[in-house]
Every structure is written in structure tokens, then in C-alpha cells.
Amino acid sequence: MNYYSLHHKSPKSTFKNAVVQGLAKDRGIYFPDTITPLSKDFIENISEYSNHEIAYEVIKQFVGDEIPAEKLKKIIKETVSFDFPLVKIDDNIASLELFHGPTMAFKDVGAKFMSQCLEYFNQGNTDEITVLVATSGDTGGAVANGFLGAKGVNVVILYPSGKVSDIQEKQLTTLGQNITALEVDGVFDDCQEMVKTAFLDEEITKTLTSANSINVARWLPQMFYFFFAYKELQSKNKELVFSVPSGNFGNICAGIMAQKLGLPIKHFIASTNINDTVPTYLVEGIYKPKPSKATISNAMDVGNPSNFIRIQELFNNDLETLKDAFSSYSFTDDETRATMKDIYRNTGYVAEPHGAVGYLGLKKYGLKENEFGIFLETAHPVKFLDVVEDVLPVKVEIPEQIKKIINNKKVAFKASNYQDLKDFLMK
Ligand SMILES: *Cc1c(COP(=O)(O)O)cnc(C)c1O
């Protein structure tokens, strides 16, 4: 399968090259050359397939012959290693829980798939690949866990000192092996800036790549969730509406890809916090990135969502066509807290802030009689413990995955500026 750069100034790329490089040379993100719908028969009979079989059918055209079928199946087995329950909240709404993986964040799937692809593509090379990531909390843990032990791949995670939760910090700093944490004296934007500078620094000769959702191997496996949800649906008579809590818009863009592959989805809602670049664009027709603002759903504090350009491409860059199939709404922290309370009071369900924003999207859209709404719950409540226990009268039980690491010893290197990162990478 070939991929082209959405800046259209680089030659086409193989899947392998797109995974190893992350970004094209013209700094554009990659997009698949062709998207071939799956057979109607497969989609109509989806309940007869295992999650592993579904994932293989969904991803195989995007990998092509660059990974042998047997190896790709093995990668899928490692990646799809937990459940994705669809929990009914009321008559016409369910929560798709994506948080039952090793770090309890939905990014576990993309991180594992990408690490396994990189390891495969780099085998036999003497040079190691260095994956650089800046995290505001959630991504780092999933990447650290997903890449742990991947041969020939080193991971350097930059995080802002004192700005991630205790649990998140433990997830980043206690694994060892090929994972290194750099504790940056600054905020998330400083971490992001240092990573960007490193990518442009010609004195760094190591092969650097990024593990955020611009990478096709992290982005595409997220299509699986939407197929798994469809499989789980008891009745397939109603029209499906998905609301996706969105930050960089990678997850929702994968949902639209699933629709292109033939999954019968009627409408998408990108639900955001007050970082409302996309909702504003849909109203005003002008795309204006803004600096990000801090919220209680902080994994979505993104002012310039990097995957939105992929969504525009999927709709032929036509705003009117986009608006038919896609809505986007923005919600404040107060609305989010009030909704967490409402959901809990009415149904007993504990939603963390990102899921609550997703639920709000369905309410604002206003489901019709013949529609069924699914919102994606992207993190376990324990990942946002302070907010959840502050807003709801509950005590969140600490899951086994988290208990295992909570007493491990933190190891992190301090970095206060770009030179510190550079020294570290040139060692
Ligand atoms: C990353 C993340 C999101 C946003 O996902 P995108 O694909 O960047 O839109 C939402 N919720 C949680 C908990 C996340 O970690």
C-alpha cells in the first residue's frame, strides 16, 4: 500500500517508510493512496468473526505485503489483547469502553501496534530507532508500555515536571529497559517544542520518529473500535451515531475510515472541550488554530488538531459534504462536571471527563427515534481520579494494572532546555 503526503510535495511512500519516518520530508502527514470497502457479506456477518479476525480484515489492505500475513496476525494478537465492552447507559445510548488495556487508556492499541511494526521493520538493522514523544500525561504511559522491550527501538518520553498525575508519572518513569523519561522543567508546550526542534536538528544523526497519531501505524488500528462496537450491538436496526471525545482528532478520523470501509455509520460527532478550533471552523468556515487552553479533560487540550487535515481529505476538502456527515460541539468544564453528575444520578454510570464530553455531544446533537448513539469512553476513571472523586460521591477502586506500578521507583532524567535533550540524544 502506498501513502501520499497531504502537503503533496513528497514522493509516495511505502507503509514501512511511513511508519519509520512518521512525517513526510515535506512535513506533511501521510494518507493512504486507496481505500477499498470490505465485502457486504463480511459486515453483515460480523458477529461470526473474532476480534482478531475482524482486526486483520480491517487493517490488511493498509499494510499490504510489507508484513507477511502470519506476522501481521501475531501483531494483532498482541495488540488486541483485552475487551472493548459496549455498556448500555439508557434506551438509546451506550458507552464504548476503550480503557481495559494495560495502561487503561485507549491509546494502548495504537501504541502497541506501532511498536510491533517498528520492531519488525527494523530487525536486522544495526542502528536503533529512537521514538521521541512529548506527553501531557496520557499518551506517555501508553507509549511506554506499548514499546517496552521492542528490540532495536528506544523510547524517550518528555513530560512536564509536576504537571502530570502521580499515577501517570509512575507509568512513565518506572518501566526501565528501552524506555527513558525526561522530566522537563516547564509545561507541555515546552516539551512539544523540544521534540520539534530535535526533528529539525541536522546534527542529530540518529533515526528519530514520533509516536503520536500522525503516525499511520498508531492512527489506523483505531478503526478496530468502531467495528468491535458494531459487532457488539444487540440490534442493528437503528441508525448509528458515534460521538468521539476529540483532541488531535485521530480517533474520530479512524472512525470515518471505518465508515469508508463500509461500516454503516450515519453520523459522527467530534466532541471537544473549550479548545474549539474545529467546532468554530464548522460554523465560520475558516480554520484558525489557537493556543491550547487547560481543562479537566486535558488529553483533549489541543488548539491545532493534527489529524483534521485527514478528515478534510476524506470529504474531498468540501465543507458542505463534511457538515452532512459530521458535527462538532464544544463544552465547558462546568457543563462536563454537571453531566458527570447527571449520568451518575440517572444511571449509576461513572464517566470520567472525556467520556462525559462525548456523552454531551450526543445530547446536543439530539438523537432521533430511529437512531442509536455510542460515545467513546477513552480513559478509566482512575486516570482522572482527582476530578472524578471531586465531582462524584464515589471512591474509585484502583485496578490491578495500576496497583502493580504504584510502588515502583521513579527514574527520570532532568532536562531544562533543548540542549539537555540534544546532549542526551548525542550520547
Ligand atoms: C488522546 C485522548 C483523547 C483524544 O484523542 P484524539 O485521537 O487525539 O482525538 C481523548 N481522551 C483521552 C483520555 C485521550 O488520552
Image (tube, rainbow, N blue to C red):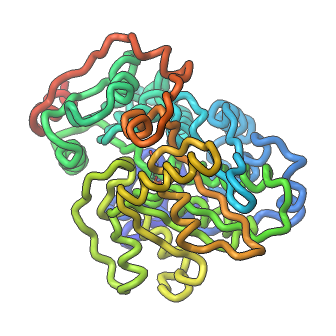
Residue shown at 32% from the left, 31% from the top = 165
- For the N terminus, the quadrant is bottom right
Residue shown at 55% from the left, 75% from the top = 326
Residue shown at 40% from the left, 39% from the top = 138
- For the C terminus, the quadrant is top left
Residue 92 percent coordinates (x, y): 72, 62
Residue 61, located in which quarter of the rendered image? bottom right
The tally of labels here is 0
Residue 278, located in which quarter of the rendered image? bottom left
Residue 75 percent coordinates (x, y): 65, 35
User: Is residue 201 visible in the rendered structure shown here?
Assistant: no
Residue 101 shown left or right of residue 317 in the figure: right
Q: In terms of depth relative to the viewer, which is nearer, 37 or 10?
A: 37
Residue 333 vs 323, above or below: the answer is above
Residue 9, located in which quarter of the rendered image? bottom left
Residue 52 vs 215, above or below: the answer is above
Residue 371 shown left or right of residue 277 in the figure: right
Residue 16 shown left or right of residue 191 in the figure: right
User: Is residue 426 visible in the rendered structure shown here?
Assistant: yes
Residue shown at 40% from the left, 84% from the top = 283
Residue 313 percent coordinates (x, y): 50, 75
Q: In terms of depth relative to the viewer, which is nearer, 223 or 268?
A: 268
Q: In terms of depth relative to the viewer, which is nearer, 156 or 425?
A: 156
Residue 193 percent coordinates (x, y): 19, 49
Q: Among all residues in the image, which is located at the extreme bottom?
A: 320
